[in-house]
Amino acid sequence: NAGVTQTPKFQVLKTGQSMTLQCAQDMNHNSMYWYRQDPGMGLRLIYYSASEGTTDKGEVPNGYNVSRLNKREFSLRLESAAPSQTSVYFCASTTLSYEQYFGPGTRLTVT
Amino acid sequence: AQSVTQLDSQVPVFEEAPVELRCNYSSSVSVYLFWYVQYPNQGLQLLLKYLSGSTLVKGINGFEAEFNKSQTSFHLRKPSVHISDTAEYFCAVSERAAVNKLTFGGGTRVLVKP
């Protein structure tokens, strides 16, 4: 039981490049989330998916897109990376009693 | 929309001393409350949660928190800390009608000194 896994762990992009962050969970959770973490700001919700086939915007969705590929996988895409998107990105999934399980994170730097 | 304020960005504390991390929230509706811990270079892990019932909630690793509705607070306490409690702690809130939208505070970094 791996929990929530994320790839890659680290990534450096140049401004304007695109990339997809991958996330998978093996706990059969319905809901999945993408957050970004910036110093002093806690975690901010980018997008979430309450169930397979649905996605909704969170607090900071601009510049991102998501895909809920199936119940296990939820990917985050940056179409044209900007330096303001330098951050640590966390994927999470939640139990029916609202406990969120987090992945190890992806540290992204945009130069 | 709800918001969360963690009043201390850093808390230094000596080993075996008690610690209290303060959290205040604002919301016009009923909420669920959570404390998460993040060890260096890791994801977050749930310490405890308040959904309903008793306002004193016990969590893992000897932590507890008390929900105070009148003061809109959810402070976290531990009577005796260990070096291994060095980490960053996050308070979070969601409205009961929108449980998928979790709002986090800015975090409190706890440094336990020997």
Image (spheres, coloured by chain):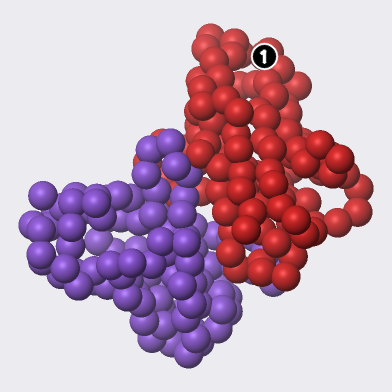
Chain colours: A purple, B red
Q: Is residue B59 left or right of residue B37?
A: right
Where A68 falls versus A39 (above or below)?
A: below
Kind of element beneath mark 1: loop
> Residue B109, position in %: x, y?
50, 28
> Residue B79, position in %: x, y?
75, 21
Q: Quadrant of residue A21?
A: bottom left
Viewer-proximal residue, B24 or A10? Answer: B24
Residue depicted at x 51% and y 27%? B9
Q: Residue type at mark 1: give it.
A: Glu
Where B45 falls versus B31 (above or below)?
A: above
Q: Is residue B34 left or right of residue B53?
A: left
Specify whether residue A23 is in view.
yes
Where B28 falls versus A46 (above or below)?
A: above
Residue depicted at x 38% and y 38%? A39
Q: Which residue is mark 1?
A: B16
> Which chain's residue wears label 1?
B
> Residue B80, position in %: x, y?
71, 19
Mark 1, other Cα within 10 Å: few <14 / some 14–19 / many ≥20: some
Q: Quadrant of residue A96?
A: bottom right
Specify whether residue B36 is in view.
no
Toward the right, the furthest residue is: B54
> Residue B30, position in %: x, y?
79, 59
